[in-house]
Image (cartoon, rainbow, N blue to C red):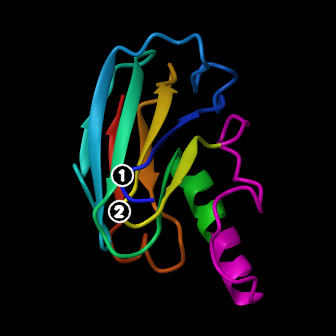
Amino acid sequence: MSGMTVTAWAEGEHGGGHGANGNAEVERTISVEAGDMWFDPEEMNIAPGETVKFEITNTGSIEHEFVIGDESAQEAHREMMQEMGSHGDGGHDGHGGHDMAEGEHGGRMPSVTIGAGETRTLVWTAPTGVEHLEYACNIPGHYESGMYGDINL
């Protein structure tokens, strides 16, 4: 499936203001590279309320995810991913098999899973009233190896 592009529309995280839908007008595209245990860029500046299309290309040799959320939601998602791995369920097959952690203000975290060599897109509207979020790969061991970055709002 090399070169395949799939679009995922993000669900709201912060009371409906965090996320996009099929009617959102994309204001900017940000290219993100997911390598083996790193993201480039490592930091992004996005205006509150701005709708961004992330084009995430996995140039690494293993599957990664790109999840946006606050620090506590990322930590909760990492713990859930660790539990899934420890129960021998065969690893990470996208987010269809488990619920994403909720952010501080409720709602599901916007995310995509990107296989090795794939490019996926995620359209997301930055929330208002929040100063900092993270994007991360929470597959066991990936965050700890440096697969996360900051979103400054």
**Viewer-nearest residue: 150 or 129:** 150
Q: Amino acid at mark 2?
A: Gly
Work out whether 59 lies above or below 28. Answer: below
- Residue placed farthest to the front in the image? 1
Label placed on residue 117: 2
Q: Which residue is mark 1?
A: 3
What segment carries the magenta color?
79-108
Q: Secondary structure at mark 1?
A: loop
On screen, residue 53 versus residue 86, left or right, reads: left
Whole-percent x, y for residue 7 in the image: 52, 36
**Does the residue at mark 1 contact the one at mark 2 (Cβ under 8 Å)?**
yes
Q: Where is residue 46, by image quadrant?
A: top left
Give the x, y percent position of residue 66: 47, 52
Between the residue at mark 1 and the residue at mark 2, the CA separation in whole angstroms equals: 7 Å
Badge 2 density bin: few <14, some 14–19, many ≥20, Cα 10 Å: some
User: Would residue 34 appear left or right of 49 to someone viewing this image?
Assistant: left
Q: Quadrant of the C terminus?
A: top left
Nearest-to-viewer mark from 1 and 2: 1
- Rendered residue at 75%/82% (across/down): 89
Does 145 sit above or below residue 46? below
